[in-house]
Amino acid sequence: MATLANRPTDRSSASAAPEEGGRRLDLFPVPVFIWKWNEAEQRKSQLLETIRHRRASEPGIVRTNRDGWHSDTDLPAWEEPGFLELVRWATACVRQSSLIWSGDAVANSELLGSWRLNGWANVNPPGGHNISHTHAQRNWNWSACYYVDLPDIAREEVGGALVLEERGTGLRPKGGQPSRTFRHIPAEGEIIIFPATLFHSVEPHNGPGDRVSIALNFHHPALELARLWEHRPRIWWRKFPKLMRRVAQLRGSQDWSAGAAPHGYDVVPLEASAEA
Ligand SMILES: [Fe+2]
């Protein structure tokens, strides 16, 4: 996979000993999966029509997006043609990725049933980009990006690379850049799946027209908590989770107790549904 377009930008040398007599160990690779949707071409115009219509009628929200439109985060519940199919296929990909990643640690039977999702559409005009961030704030396990429409020019020139960053170790020069990054140049119809805790950004889109993608987050109770330390529940939630959960139910607000499923939509993956 390490082509000219998709290359690690490792500014250090893995073989260099830090000092004479020392050793360096690079441990624990990050699991990232890429799958291709075989319905991508036939569904593309359906998806684009809906996204353009919603963009024209909905103000959208600002999160990490800069100079681009970000829909509300209820995409898994969109009823327009093509979205349910895409979301259920994506969920099947995440389920399969989880099984491959875990080896024997998570049994197939443990990952049956529905997954909790949220998601949104992104439309980036020229110059649109996303600043560095993670999706771990609400106990999401996996995050993903599906590419609906990319401008049809040379892929390196069009910009918009997804940059995955080596962070989260607690080791980084203060205010500095991550020591290692991986630039992925996306292709239409593919979904890239990575841990929700992984820092990532999107480089500015340089091509003509809009660049359209769909972001999704996934949670399954069989997977471990995904919270980063700074997003751990506040003290009241840690000390009195039952009381706080009851209060949240009465107020209709988010359950922030450790291990709670994030607010979202329950989706049954395509293959599990077909077997039922
Ligand atoms: Fe993101």
Image (tube, rainbow, N blue to C red):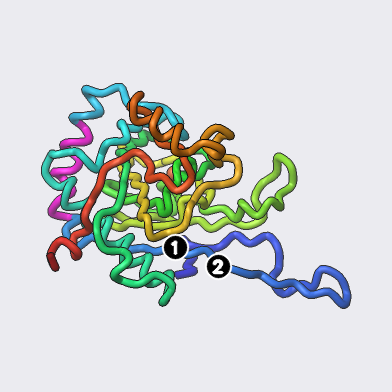
Would you call the spot at circle 2 few (<14 residues within 10 Å), some (14-19), or many (20 or more)? few
Question: Which SS does the magenta portion mostly show?
Answer: helix
Q: Secondary structure at mark 2?
A: loop
- In the image, residue 39 lies in the stretch drawn in magenta: no
Left or right: residue 116 versus residue 139 is left
Amino acid marked by disc 1: Val
* Of 219 and 211, the residue lying toward us: 219
Looking at the rendering, the stretch of residues picked out in magenta corresponds to 41-52
Residue hosting label 2: 29
Q: Residue at x 14, y 68 (%)?
A: 275
The percent coordinates of residue 245 (x first, y second) are 41, 35
Image quadrant containing the C terminus: bottom left
Helix, strand or loop status at disc 1: loop
Rendered-image quadrant of the N terminus: bottom left
In front of the other: 243 or 181: 243
Q: Would residue 182 be found to the left or right of residue 210 on screen? A: right
- Percent across and percent down for residue 211 are 33, 41
Q: Where is residue 110 drawn, in percent x and y?
A: 32, 66
Q: Give left or right: position of 141 versus 52.
A: right
Where does ligand 1 appear, by image quarter?
top left
Q: Which quarter of the figure has residue 265?
A: top left
Q: Which mark is residue 93?
A: none
- Residue sitting nearer the eye, 115 or 169: 115
* Residue hosting label 1: 32
Residue at the image position 42 percent from the left and 27 percent from the top: 62
Compared with 68, 181 (above or below) is: below
111 or 75, which is in the foreground? 111
Asked if marks 2 and 1 touch (Cβ < 8 Å), the reply is no
Label 1 CB-ligand 1 distance < 8 A: no
* Amino acid of disc 2: Pro
The residue positioned 24% from the left and 43% from the top of the image is 76
Query: Would you place residue 229 above or below residue 114 in this image?
Result: above
